[in-house]
């Protein structure tokens, strides 16, 4: 098992996060079920250094499990189409380039509203689904543009913050970035941790940093980007995942998309099992977002199947699972058009902004 039992099952149940100290005692309704166990939204818990230090990862076992997962999974015809439609509904369409413009963001919002061509939707007979992506993710500068472009759609606006992608600007500036985006109307904030805290084992510093981010997010959901491609070991990934969840992360996210190595299935396995252990122990659900390095429809199915295997059906919806992989949409559209018409379309027929 890639993430070993920490020996602290049940120790954190009933503990409250510092930010929840003054709130009422009535728990919110369940947001997920983890193999029959009802889970509430994550409000965090006090940092347990014993739990963090007890995390162990068998790297070779994680890699073998990821390889066998890919080898034994397949989906054809209507089953493949169904998985791909679910993948679209879990996407965060993203533009985070130095040459972003308001016009590009507006086009991305149009794509978010109608991710698949209307003629393909009609051929598939899915008009009643109202298919759309989960969110559009942009820099703070374009939050208001995205809000206007998505008005009335129910699609969320996410903003990257905290010195994205390196996360090395002063803490006060990173917190101010979050607050500006929340004030501008962002529904979700993707924050970047200080990776140096992980390398040095400064878990208290990392926990306190993320708690400050959580406080600044207020009503907005917080996705904590670990930058797994920079963390060097799967054990570091596992430990950083637990600290982020203890600090109140609504989602833990693999990557910024800017690292040389981004989302990989072994990393996803370790993070999913951390979410599972945290859920069993605390009774609270945390979402998961792989980001970067995913380009094909087959990869979308591999990731969704991993979520179903490791965490169950609750993690097959946008409330607890997201793809940060805009480039994947092109191949998904091609596969859906092939299913609907029997022909593959050229990539340029499904352009992204």
Image: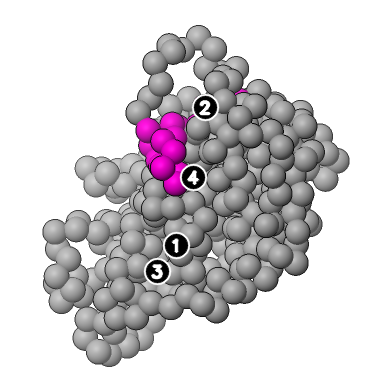
Q: Earlier in the sequence, mark 2 or mark 1?
A: 2
Q: Nearer the viewer, mark 3 or mark 4?
A: 4
Q: Nearer the viewer, mark 3 or mark 2?
A: 2
Q: Which mark is residue 287?
A: 4
Tell me the SS state at disc 2.
loop
Q: Is residue 142 left or right of residue 119?
A: right
Q: Earlier in the sequence, mark 1 or mark 4?
A: 4
In the rendered image, the vertical position of residue 290 relative to residue 208, given as above or below: below
Tell me the SS state at disc 1.
helix
The single residue placed furthest to the bottom in the displayed view is 343
Figure quadrant of residue 183: top left
- Using a 10 Å C-alpha cutoff, classify the residue at mark 3 as few (fewer than 14 neighbours), some (14 to 19) or many (20 or more): many
Q: Earlier in the sequence, mark 3 or mark 2?
A: 2
- Using a 10 Å C-alpha cutoff, classify the residue at mark 4 as few (fewer than 14 neighbours), some (14 to 19) or many (20 or more): many
> Magenta segment range?
30-45
In percent of the image, x 71 and y 37: which residue is there?
Answer: 7
Q: Which residue is mark 3?
A: 329
Query: How many numbered badges does the structure rendering display?
Result: 4
The percent coordinates of residue 142 (x first, y second) are 44, 45
Q: Nearer the viewer, mark 1 or mark 3?
A: 1
The percent coordinates of residue 136 (x first, y second) are 40, 51
The image quadrant where one finds the C terminus is: bottom left
The percent coordinates of residue 208 (x first, y second) are 70, 26
In percent of the image, x 44 and y 69: which residue is there?
Answer: 301
Tell me the SS state at disc 3.
helix
Q: Earlier in the sequence, mark 3 or mark 4?
A: 4
- Mark 1 vs 4: CB contact within 8 A: no
Q: Which residue is mark 2?
A: 43
Q: Earlier in the sequence, mark 1 or mark 3?
A: 1
């Amino acid at each position: 098992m890639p993430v070993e039992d920490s020996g602290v099952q049940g120790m954190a149940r009933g503990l409250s996060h510092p930010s929840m100290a003054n709130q009422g005692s009535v728990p919110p309704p369940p947001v997920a079920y983890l193999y029959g166990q009802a889970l509430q939204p994550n409000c965090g818990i006090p940092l347990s250094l014993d739990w963090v230090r007890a995390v162990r990862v068998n790297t070779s076992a994680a890699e073998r499990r990821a390889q066998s997962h890919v080898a034994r999974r397949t989906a054809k015809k209507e089953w493949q189409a169904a998985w791909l439609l679910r993948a679209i509904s879990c996407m965060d369409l993203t533009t985070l380039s130095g040459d972003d413009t308001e016009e590009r963001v507006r086009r991305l919002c149009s794509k978010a509203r109608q991710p698949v061509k209307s003629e393909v939707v009609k051929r598939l007979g899915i008009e009643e689904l109202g298919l759309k992506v989960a969110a559009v993710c942009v820099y703070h500068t374009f939050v208001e543009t995205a809000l206007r472009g998505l008005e009335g759609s129910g699609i969320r606006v996410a903003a990257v913050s905290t010195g994205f992608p390196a996360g090395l600007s002063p803490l006060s500036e990173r917190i101010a970035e979050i607050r500006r985006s929340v004030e501008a109307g962002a529904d979700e904030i993707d924050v970047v941790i200080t990776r140096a805290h992980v390398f040095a084992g400064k878990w208290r510093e990392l926990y306190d940093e993320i708690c400050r981010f959580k406080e600044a997010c207020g009503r907005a959901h917080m996705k904590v980007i670990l930058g797994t491609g920079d963390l060097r070991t799967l054990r570091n990934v596992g430990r950083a995942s637990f600290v982020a969840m203890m600090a109140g992360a609504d989602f833990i996210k693999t990557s910024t998309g800017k690292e040389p190595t981004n989302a990989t299935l072994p990393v996803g396995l370790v993070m999913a099992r951390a979410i599972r252990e945290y859920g069993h122990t605390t009774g609270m659900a945390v979402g998961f977002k792989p980001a970067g390095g995913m380009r094909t429809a087959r990869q979308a199915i591999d990731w969704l199947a991993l979520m179903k295997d490791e965490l169950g059906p609750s993690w097959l919806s946008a409330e607890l699972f997201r793809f940060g992989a805009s480039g994947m949409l092109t191949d998904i559209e091609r596969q859906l058009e092939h299913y609907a018409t029997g022909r593959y379309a050229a990539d340029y027929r499904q352009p992204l902004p």
